[in-house]
Amino acid sequence: MIGKRSLPLAVLKTLFLAIWLVITAFPLYWIVITSFKEPGSITSYPIKYWPSHFSLENYTQLFTLSNFFVNIRNSFVVALVAGAVATSIALLSGYVLSKFEFRGKTAVFLCFLITQMLPAFIALGPLYIMMTHMDLVNSIVGLILVYIAVCIPFSAIMLKGFFDNIPDELEEASMVDGCNRMQSLIYIIIPVMRPGLIAAFVFNFVNCWNELFLSVTLAQRSSVKTIPAALQGFISSFDIDWGSLSAASVLAIIPSMIIFAFASKHIVAGLTAGAVK
């Protein structure tokens, strides 16, 4: 009797999830399909949900008529360097916040939390003035430094939760065997918390890869633009280059999908280990 009653509910849940999947997946499908349409057929009517002829002309135009190779290189350099440095600094910050007691510890932790509540545009004016005085506007180095500062608070909070779940006895046992605190951190604790480090790096990389607001403001030259800023260039006041925009969007999505595909297990393990005490 219970099974008969639960069957309609299960059908409704499955139907709802199927509809929700179609709604969420359709924009991605439409971007991919549009990128393979012939440029003249993208805005033609009636709308074709499956092109009659597939074409690579949009991808050809993307690399011949724009500096998209340079934009890809800039995004990789910025995301890799900023993600790695921010994760390294956050590792030490999370370790200190978790394992040490000092005056102002709570204030530092609250400052990290508050930075996650404030929108980025609030600090844009002072940040732009400071970067201008330091001659770091339209500079890859300046963009990397800003992204490092943006990524550290969230990563430190996440890694602190992971450090909290590592028993102090593990570190004390290594010190009894002759390790100092830094050796204990490098040889004992870091291998244990590898999933947390991978999760933090992946989130930092993806955030830097997809960030638009700061990149548009601080990197206006075509030679230093990242992919999000380059995508905005395909939208003008009177026209939108849908073909090149779709092709560029597909190429921008691929690295994030590959990273999440290979690091998904570590991401889940890192998040659950850092969240559950």
Image (cartoon, rainbow, N blue to C red):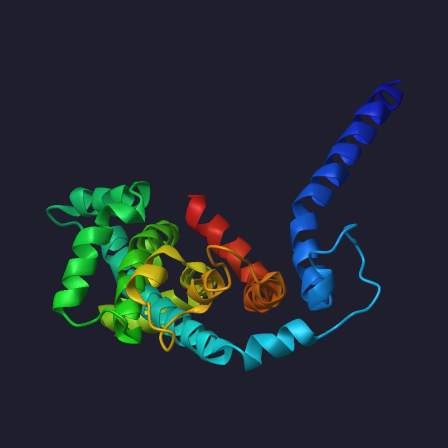
Residue 13 vs 29, above or below: the answer is above
Residue 60 vs 240, above or below: the answer is below
Q: Is residue 79 left or right of residue 46?
A: left
Residue 76 horizontal/vertical position (percent) = 44, 74
Q: Is residue 60 visible?
A: yes
**Quadrant placement of the C terminus:** top left
Residue 232 horizontal/vertical position (percent) = 46, 60
Residue 125 horizontal/vertical position (percent) = 20, 52
**Quadrant placement of the N terminus:** top right
Residue 243 vs 273, above or below: the answer is below
Q: Is residue 159 left or right of residue 132?
A: right
The image quarter containing residue 212 is bottom left
Q: Is residue 129 left or right of residue 239?
A: left
Image label count:
0
Residue in the image at 73% along x and 56% along y: 44
Residue 222 horizontal/vertical position (percent) = 38, 74
Residue in the image at 28% along x and 43% along y: 113
Residue 30 vs 37, above or below: the answer is above
Frontmost residue, 4 versus 168? 4
Q: Is residue 179 visible?
A: no
Frontmost residue, 256 versus 224? 224
Q: Is residue 133 left or right of residue 158?
A: left
Frontmost residue, 78 versus 193? 78
